[in-house]
Amino acid sequence: MPGMFELAMPWWEFVIRAVIVYFVLLLMLRMSGKRTVGQFTPFDLLVVVLLGTAVQNSLIGEDYSLLGGLILAATLIACNWLVGFVSARSSRVDALVEGSPVMLARDGQLFERVLLQQSLNANDVDEALRDNGLRDVSEAALVTLEVDGTITVVPRSGAGR
């Protein structure tokens, strides 16, 4: 097992590569919208798997050592911890990283343009309505796309269940 612990590049290059890839992917996923991270369809899962494959060489370069992989893993976990740590202490950073909820409907009125902007369709809202025991959007006081990609429904008083 020669080479298992021999790095093909300096250790700090792994760290720099991992930090760059982490934050660029975070930005790209943030820009792609809430649906990508919240409501996984088979298409979304495929994109996530392919993203991992696409950035593999950016992370590892020509190194195939165990030590190199462990350095990358530790760096990516540290980046994730750091983003969580800073987000918990700064509402500005939290809003930048997580985003904010988006109103999809209010008082029975569905906002079609907002759905398009969020890469959603009426079927996504209909599913959330059914999950909450409502027949259609007219029975909803508020429908919101949360920062984690889930759709929250607040029924009108006396509607549904």
Image (spheres, grey):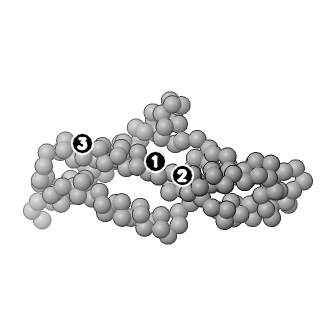
Q: Amino acid under label 3?
A: Ile
Mark 3 surroundings within 10 Å by alpha-carbon count, few (fewer than 14), some (14 through 19), many (20 or more): some
Mark 2 lies on residue? 34
The residues tagged by marks 2 and 3 sit, at their Cα atoms, a distance apart of 28 Å
Q: Amino acid under label 2?
A: Lys
**Quadrant of the image for the C terminus?**
bottom right
* Residue 86: image location, x then y, percent: 45, 33
Find residue 108 and name its label: none
* Residue 60: image location, x then y, percent: 22, 55
**Quadrant of the image for the N terminus?**
bottom left
Mark 3 lies on residue? 16
Q: Which of the two discs, 2 and 3, sits closer to the camera?
A: 2
State which quadrant residue 138 falls in.
bottom right
- Residue 85 vertical position relative to residue 33 in the rendered view, above or below: above
Of residues 108 and 12, the one drawn nearer to the viewer in this rendering = 108
Of residues 145 and 109, the one drawn nearer to the viewer in this rendering = 109
* Residue 51: image location, x then y, percent: 36, 60
Mark 1 lies on residue? 31
Residue 130 in view, yes or no: yes
SS label for mark 1: helix
State which quadrant residue 79 falls in.
top left
Q: Amino acid under label 1?
A: Met
Mark 2 surroundings within 10 Å by alpha-carbon count, few (fewer than 14), some (14 through 19), many (20 or more): many
Disc on the earlier residue, 3 or 1: 3
The residues tagged by marks 1 and 2 sit, at their Cα atoms, a distance apart of 9 Å
SS label for mark 3: helix
